[in-house]
Image (spheres, coloured by chain):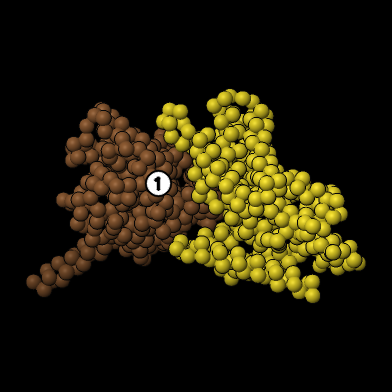
Chain colours: A yellow, B brown
Amino acid sequence: METNADRAGRRYRDQSGLWARFKAYEAVSILAVTIGFLAALAIWTMITGGEFKFFTYGNLSVLSQQVPITAIAAIGVGLLMIAGEFDISIAGTFTLVAFVIALTVGELAFPLAVALAIGFSVAILIGLINGFITCWLGIPSFIATIGMMFFLRGAVRFVSVNPETDLPDSILFASPMAFKAVMTGHAGGPFYAQLFWLGLVAFAGYLILNRHRLGNHIFTAGGNRNAAISIGVNVKRTKLIAFVICAVTAGFAGLLQATRITEIEPSYATISGLELKAIAAAVVGGVSLYGGRGTILGMILGAALIDCVDNVLVLINAPETVFKGILGAVIILAVVLNNLVSRREVS
Amino acid sequence: MKELSLFKAAFASACVAMALSGVPAAAQELEPVKVTFIQHCCSGATFFQPMQFGAEEAARLFNVELTYVNADGDAARAANLIETAIAEGQDAVIPTITVPDALDEAIKKAKDAGLIVIVQNIDDPMGAAGNARDSFVGQDFIASGKIIGQKMIDHYGLKEGDHCLLPVEFPELTYAIERAQGVQSALEPAGITSEIIGTGTVDAEALTIISQALVANPKITCAVGLGTTPTTNIPDAAIEAGRDGLPNGGFDTNPKIMENIMAGTTVGTMDQQPFWQGYLPVMFAAYEKRYGLKAVDFDTGNNLIDAENGALALKWGGTYR
């Protein structure tokens, strides 16, 4: 039986000509939505005579530091969703990895390289546990990772205890200046290093999904599990790898944020809402909630769209009381438009 | 005589004209001052209602274009909002420093860009030495903690061997640490021990957490809420845990806290007067932008509200109180 992965690949290959292949590309719908959104902002900027500051140097600087964080988390979550699973614990992973690295450097005075190795080992372990519980114990990933979410919130509070006060406390991440410059430094114009790291993660994600057998397995396992098994795909191992990738990207996003603001608060694991934001970004970007479909570009554009809408609401001074409601409505609208454009292409 | 009267009239007119030329124009006639006010978290939480009310009232009175936004408890988002204010060309930004060093860079960028930066509600533990901010408008948490701690001892007769629960929304934030220090500075010399628990900002969750703590730990003989949410919920939690009449007090005001105080269920609360924390920074920003009057640090008060003076707080809860 033809899977979503097969259909996507066949549709892409059967088209002749660059324009036809472009139209067949799955992310073209979210690209159209994004271009439409930016065009609307550009028109609004002209109407207001430049009073609307979205396209200013300063505002683009803010976005170039914020969007990569959301997008990197969305890439990990999105890739896992293509494989047919969810991870609701990424905010905890995001915070815990940053805490472990900061503690290792600050309290234990280990070299940064060792701290990074330990921190990302924690991320890998979280991914492995999530994957094992889901794939070998058969617990739905939604439930398994909710459990992990609560566990990680507790773990963050545990490791964040200040021995002087015996209470959870935020921690300073005293990274070397060179490391800070490489990870989050000003790259020129309105661009910051976080964009480079997003590019690197996105490229790696693209290679995995579209240029490696693992990507085929991820699409197939998510699109049709039984078909994947019947053609010899090791579904459990494939999904396990996807869980690990998700956790590692979440940890990396946490490291970038901690490097930028130099301090990590344990409450971020609890109140940030990063998990829902990353899933929303992936879905807005065209990743199917049912698995088997999605693109790296779509995940990035979905994250950018959500963060840009948030930014626009601040710029237009939207009332604080309706802020979240408007943001949610726009996300729903983006998903609906995305689906409409996608259906027109398929028909 | 007529000539003398004309001379007097001309002289008087000249005096009035000279006087009027020195009178500043009303705020509404001047260029609006553009200010971004960043509430650090908890959209919809009752504590922040007077703060927003105050900021909006000052904006109306002093012709300020106010952008009121919420950082949702995320220091990185707060940093983004400060940088967005810079990009928008605001005249001033008014953030809260919930985490000591997270906003240092953003505040410095704001100062370098010429913005006025006035911190409200929670300051850097190092005060002005901690970052580039111009001034702080808020409560001295340590002093206020000592006041309510002493009130608990005096009113309830707490003594050596008593053990107080200190629930707070976010134990790791500066306000929680300093309030706890203040309360403990009163309790510990009297031989009273204490422990801190985190409750979050959701009333239902806080109620459950506090009641379970009371059930699990019979040696708890008193409770001092270090924030609005726990102070609101301690009395109900005590009832749920079968500990009616548990000595309790706390921080901040809302209608429920005031009802408990007026009913005698709670001894009192330390009011940090969030209305001033909204109103004064906006006013300071307007005056500094227009006239160069530098914003100053302002202690919004260690106002202990109890049954004797709580009537006005009850009446104006949600707006001015």
The residue depicted at 70 percent of the width and 61 percent of the height is A290
B303 horizontally vs A8: left or right: left
The residue depicted at 20 percent of the width and 50 percent of the height is B264
Please tell me how crowded label 1 is: few (under 14), some (14-19), or many (20+) other residues with Cα within 10 Å: many
The residue depicted at 46 percent of the width and 28 percent of the height is A163
Quadrant including the C terminus of chain B: bottom left
Residue A19 location (% of width, % of height) = 85, 67
Q: Nearer the viewer, residue B283 or B114?
A: B283
The kind of residue tagged 1 is Ile
Residue placed under numbered mark 1 in the picture: B209
B14 horizontally vs B75: left or right: left
Quarter where residue B25 is shown: bottom left
Quarter where residue B135 is shown: top left
Indicate the chain on which mark 1 is placed.
B
Up/down of B267 relative to A345, above or below: above
Residue B228 location (% of width, % of height) = 34, 50
Quadrant including the N terminus of chain B: bottom left
Up/down of A115 relative to A59, above or below: above
